[in-house]
Image: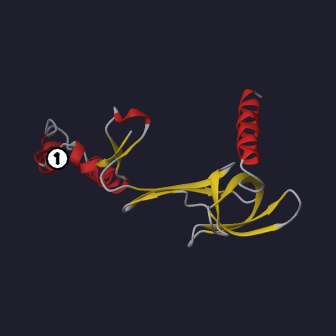
Amino acid sequence: MANDLYERKIQDGLKAIAESHGPDIIKPVTVVSVDEENFLCDCIDDLDNDMPQVLYNSIQGGSGYVVFEPAINSRIYIGKVEDSDQWIMVMPGKINKVIINADTLIQLNGGTHGGLVLRDGVKEQLNKIEADLNTIKTVFTTWVPVTGDGGAALKALTATWAGETLTETVNADIENTAITQ
């Protein structure tokens, strides 16, 4: 409820700014289709006028960029690029996808919890542990107790397994320091 009120205040403020500079500077529209490859969306305004090829890649600079892809049927605000017929999204409504491309670092929530976990690194470490557990399970399932040997047969079967230690995981094995959280 408070979020709706906040959004309405932003919308009213944008509308007031737009009206002070003339018609159609910033206007609300509804997204009807999205072209992900070219960062464009087709929209309709409140009077059912087509607003084709609205650019939604609104933040770009150098080789890094942030893209907020609007969801179909969501309301967005678009602005007209000065001295052109091009419209660009200035405020997304419901966001379908966020694409971030940064040269050095993407930081989420302050970055104090270290780098984002690398799925393949974690999977590799888990597979090693699972293989080790499966080895010892096989030893126990194939072991046949021998009367009077005091466990010597079991000790012999587990000697190879016990002699192979697992390598401890270090952060570098499973952490992407270019994305911190």
Q: Residue 103: x percent and y percent?
A: 32, 56
Name which residue lies at 37% across and 53% down: 119
158 up-or-down from 53: above or below? above
Name which residue lies at 10% across and 47% down: 163
Please name the residue that numbered disc 1 is placed on. Answer: 167
Res 141 visible: no
Whether residue 123 sits left or right of residue 95 in the image: it is left
Q: Residue 90: x percent and y percent?
A: 63, 52
Q: Nearer the viewer, residue 14 or 57?
A: 14
Tell me if mark 1 has few (under 14), some (14-19) or many (20+) residues whose alpha carbon lies within 10 angstroms of its own: few
Q: Nearer the viewer, residue 77 or 116?
A: 77
Q: How is the image coloured?
A: secondary structure
Task: Report the quarter where the N terminus lies.
Answer: top right
Res 174 visible: yes
Whether residue 22 sits left or right of residue 159 in the image: it is right
How many tags in the picture?
1
Q: Residue furthest top?
A: 2
Whether residue 157 sits left or right of residue 63 in the image: it is left
Name which residue lies at 31% across and 38% down: 114
Q: Amino acid at mark 1?
A: Thr
Task: Report the quarter where the C terminus lies.
Answer: top left
Q: Residue furthest right?
A: 47
Q: Nearer the viewer, residue 171 or 8?
A: 8
Q: Residue 143: x percent and y percent?
A: 25, 49
Name which residue lies at 37% across and 61% down: 62
The answer to which quarter of the image holds residue 45 is bottom right
Q: Determine the secondary structure under disc 1.
A: loop
Q: Residue 93: x percent and y percent?
A: 69, 48
